[in-house]
Image (cartoon, rainbow, N blue to C red):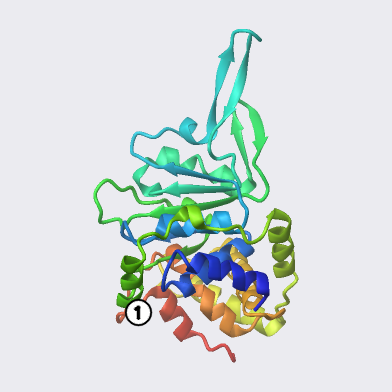
Amino acid sequence: MNSQIDSIIGQIGLHLLGKGHQIKQSLCCILGNGHLLIEDVPGVGKTTLAHTLAVSLGLSYQRVQFTSDMLPADLIGVSIFDQSKHEFTFHKGPVFSQLLLADEINRASPKTQSALLEAMAEQQVSVDGETYSLPAPFFVIATQNPLDHSGTFELPDSQLDRFMMRVCLGFPSVEAEKQMLNNPQASLDDVKQVIDIKELQSLQAQVKRVSANDAVIDYLLALVNETRINRHYPHALSPRASKAILSAAKAWAFIEGRDYVLPDDIQMVLPSVTEHRLRGGDQRGGHSLSEHLLHSINPLG
């Protein structure tokens, strides 16, 4: 494993105990230049993961608490008339940061949720006919409460599809929670920056150069095509999903210290990349839709 990658995972792991796999998934998403959705019940470390990622990677960071009365202008910004200049001046909102934490995104109305679509897809926002570029790099990490919790709105397909990966943290193990309780002094103020923006962009460039041969691409396409021809999958995977799977697989291979993708890399990232797109609430035989998909296609052809 790359020493920088190892240091980043170790730094985040000091503050999010017993979640090494989820930390690697989240870092995989960032290295693949994607947006991340973290879904779970309150209090399991969603905000901690986002904050430690931002600080460790040297990203400017803004946290926005989404609420039912939040307006798009609260996120993007607003034009205010400047009497001294006799013109409107645009005051930028929190979206103008390198990492935006949209905390409890599904508590906001669909209108406010949709304000993020342009930002996530094109790294820009449009206000009053003017287009403003967002900082580079730009990532959205959104946390989401389970839909059966009160006061939540379901994210539309168009919004879900903008997130490269979805990660579920789950409750900590007994050992990890005991360690946390025995060390209450641990603070997010102690998180240390491991790399800077140039080093992050260098890592992302190396991820893009990771190769995937025809056999791996054919395996990926077979998985995607199965969702399009099999009526068991009510939401077929789009070409954007195909690109997301490949980008995530390249990042996972890079984290594992390889410059080429194996079918195993596809299998490791596929649940996180596809479950929220397939709407895995529909399950068959106790397995999620992504697990069933993996079992239905042989990587050896």
Q: Reply above or below: 189 against 292.
A: above
Disc 1 packing (10 Å; few <14; some 14–19; many ≥20) = few
Q: Position of residue 158 (x, y in %)?
A: 49, 51
In the picture, the quarter occupied by the N terminus is: bottom right
Residue 261 occupies quadrant: bottom right
- Pointer 1: what residue? 287
Classify residue 87 as left or right of residue 162.
right
- Name the image quarter holding the C terminus: bottom right
The answer to whether any part of residue 111 appears in the image is: yes
Return the residue nearer the eye: 80 or 154.
Answer: 80
Residue type at mark 1 is: His
Left or right of 119 on screen, residue 205: right
Q: Residue at x 60, y 46 (%)?
A: 60
Q: Which element is circle 1 on?
A: loop
For the point 25% across and 56% down, the residue is: 148
Q: Quadrant of residue 243?
A: bottom right
- Residue situated in front as seen by the camera: 289 or 101: 101
Percent from the top left, x then y, of residue 197? Answer: 69, 54
Q: Is residue 229 visible?
A: no
**For this rendering, which residue is in front, 268 or 12?**
12
Counting from the top left corner in percent of width and height, residue 89 is at: 62, 20
Please state which of residues 69 and 294 is positioned toward the viewer in this rendering.
Answer: 69
